[in-house]
Amino acid sequence: MTVTEPAPPAPHHAPAAVPPLAARAGSVGGSPVRDILAVTARPEVINFAGGLPAPELFDREGIAAAFRDVLAETPERALQYSTTEGEPSLRTGIAARMSAGGLATDADDLLITTGSQQGLSLLATALLDPGDTVLVEDPCYLAALQAFGLAGARVVAVPGDAAGVDPQALEELVARERPKLFYTVPTFQNPTGRTLPAERRAAVAEVAARGGVWIVEDDPYGELRYEGERVPWIASYPGAQDRTVLLGSFSKVMAPGLRLGWLRAPAALRRACVVAKQAADLHTPTLNQLAAARCLTGLDAHVARVRDVYRERRDAMVAGLPGALPEGSTWARPEGGMFLWARLPEVYDTTALLPKVVRQDVAYVPGAPFYAGEPDRSTLRLCFVTQTPEEIGEGLRRLGEGLRQA
């Protein structure tokens, strides 16, 4: 009988490494604001770092009633897939609000997004190829820098002053850099709180028309005005109508947890964003859209109540800053929005100082991450809407103590 020898064991090989992440995933960091919020989540910390609406002001009863009514009356529709463009009732309601605000808008002009941040992401997908140039304000909204960075864009800051972007500097950069788009938050800007005057908005529209540039006008804070007169959207100015994308959001006036925003764009670009959204999430949650559409009827009254409270909190922060910040510091009184921007004397580095200040159980956001170019390291952003006036006073006392010990 022939005995078959067992086959020798196969040589052991270590498994091959998995392929690397995409280059863009490693080239863009996380949000410094989110990192700060994670570090300062202790309840005893008075946190001026986040851009968080005051949760006690949410219209909890109205929103709950809207969800109950939608589920009771149209459950089959509310729990089903929907169109990518968004629910007609919500788009119609938003269009009516925009038209009343001076920008004639039809429901078909709008795409509902999962927060206005998704609108930025969709625009980056639809408009930008790696290496394209994007112009931004200096300083600029952090998450916009993330979105453009992930798209592989080259981001260039446009100089400005206390009133906002300088149209002459914008025109020079458009001629030199040949950008695809200019991104701006012209009303109660994040992080500075400043508002671009009407004459500069008209000039920005003219520059974009002459230079062949898209304008992305982000307006999450426009309804939170506490004083002064409303300034028209850039999208309403001559020369801007065919090249401006206007982004809006319910996060600051209804509830951020609903994750509802929208974009208003010319037809061809809007269709490209619809295709990008189909690839991203098919559509924004139907139930949330239908509930929000019902909440629109009482939204103006709700926003008026919120404005009254936020105005008081803005005033409390402005009143407390002289005793909290070092001599030689400067800041502006924002007419609305959520943020106050301060500049300390040049010897201060707010990034280096933050860990020492946090030991006093108070937090802010250093200004440096908001800059696409050379940062001003003496700057910081404070959010004034989340805490009561009493908490703001105590938080500023702690901030002053932390800065004095630095």
Image: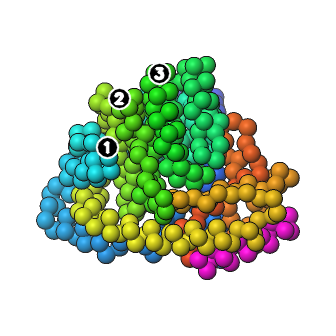
Q: Are the two marked residues, 1 and 3, in contact with CB atoms closer than 8 angstroms?
A: no
Q: Residue at x 16, y 68 (%)?
A: 72
Q: Main secondary structure of the magenta part?
A: helix
Q: Earlier in the sequence, mark 1 or mark 3?
A: 1
Residue located beneath label 3 in the image = 210
Residue 393 location (% of width, % of height): 66, 76
**SS class, disc 3:** helix
Q: Does the magenta segment cover residue 395?
A: yes
| Quarter residue 292 falls in | bottom left
Q: Residue at x 74, y 68 (%)?
A: 322
Q: Which mark is residue 242?
A: 2
Q: CA distance from mark 3 to mark 2?
A: 12 Å
Q: Which residues are magenta?
A: 389-406
Foreground mark, 3 or 2, reads 3
* Nearer-the-camera pick, 361 or 390: 390
Q: What residue type is disc 3 on?
A: Arg
Residue located beneath label 1 in the image = 103
Residue 395 location (% of width, % of height): 68, 73
Question: Left of 194 or right of it: where is 240?
Answer: left
Q: What residue type is disc 2 on?
A: Asp
Say few, some or many: other residues with alpha carbon within 10 Å of mark 2 (under 14 / 14 to 19 / 20 or more): some
Q: CA distance from mark 2 to mark 1?
A: 13 Å
Q: Residue at x 24, y 67 (%)?
A: 66
Q: CA distance from mark 1 to mark 3?
A: 22 Å
- Image quadrant holding the C terminus, namely bottom right
Q: Earlier in the sequence, mark 2 or mark 1?
A: 1
Residue 124 visible in the shown view: no
**SS class, disc 1:** loop
Residue 285 visible in the shown view: yes
